[in-house]
Image: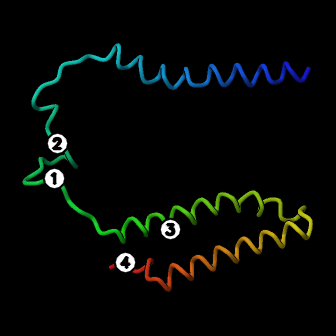
Amino acid sequence: MVEQQWLYIGVFLIIAPVFPMLALLVPRLIAPKKPNAIKLQTYECGMETVGDSWVQFKVQYYIYGLVFLVFDVEIVFLYPWAVALNILPLFAVVEGIIFIMILVGGLFYAWRKGVLEWY
C-alpha cells in the first residue's frame, strides 16, 4: 500500500512539469508571427518614449519594497495562528507572541536605519 502512495507522487512529479511547458509551447506554435517596426518600438503608458529609456531608481525604493514584502508574507503566516488562537495551547500562543516580538524588533531596526524614510 505504501509503494502505491509513492507511485502517485512519482507520477505527479513526472507529469507536473508537462502542464507549464504546454502552456508555454502551444501559444508559441499557434500564435501568428508578423513582426514589424511598430511592434518592436518601446511602448510605455500609452506614450512614445523620448530620449533614453533607461532611468536609474534609488536603491531606497527597492529596500522599502522588500521590507513591505517581508512583513506582508509574515502576516500570511500569522493569519492561521490568529484564526485558531482560541483552541491553541499556551505554548503555541507564547510562540506566536515571540514571533510577533521578533517582527516588531525587525520593524524598529528598519526604522532606526532609516529604511522607512520616504524622501
Q: Name the disc covering residue 67, or none.
A: 3
* Amino acid type at image mark 4: Trp
Counting residues from the start of the chain, the first of labels 1 and 4 encountered is 1
> What coloring was used for the rendering?
rainbow
Report, in whole angstroms, how far the alpha carbon at label 2 lies from the one at label 1: 8 Å
Tell me if 26 is positioned left or right of 98 in this view.
left
Report, in whole angstroms, how far the alpha carbon at label 3 lies from the one at label 2: 31 Å
* Amino acid type at image mark 3: Val
Question: Please, is residue 50 above or below residue 108 in the view?
Answer: above
Disc 1 marks which residue? 53
Q: Which of 72/15 is in front?
A: 15
Q: Are marks 2 and 1 in contact (CB under 8 Å)?
A: yes
- Which residue corresponds to the image point at 72% horizontal and 70% vertical from the top-left? 99
Tell me if 1 is positioned left or right of 78 in this view.
right
* Amino acid type at image mark 2: Thr
The secondary structure type at the circle numbered 1 is loop
Counting residues from the start of the chain, the first of labels 3 and 2 encountered is 2
Question: Please, is residue 79 above or below residue 30 in the view?
Answer: below
* Amino acid type at image mark 1: Ser
Disc 2 marks which residue? 42
Disc 4 marks which residue? 118
- Which residue corresponds to the image point at 44% horizontal and 77% vertical from the top-left? 115
Q: Are marks 3 and 1 in contact (CB under 8 Å)?
A: no
Residue 70 location in percent, x, y?
55, 63
Counting residues from the start of the chain, the first of labels 4 and 2 encountered is 2
**Which of the 4 image quarters holds residue 101?**
bottom right
Counting residues from the start of the chain, the first of labels 3 and 1 encountered is 1
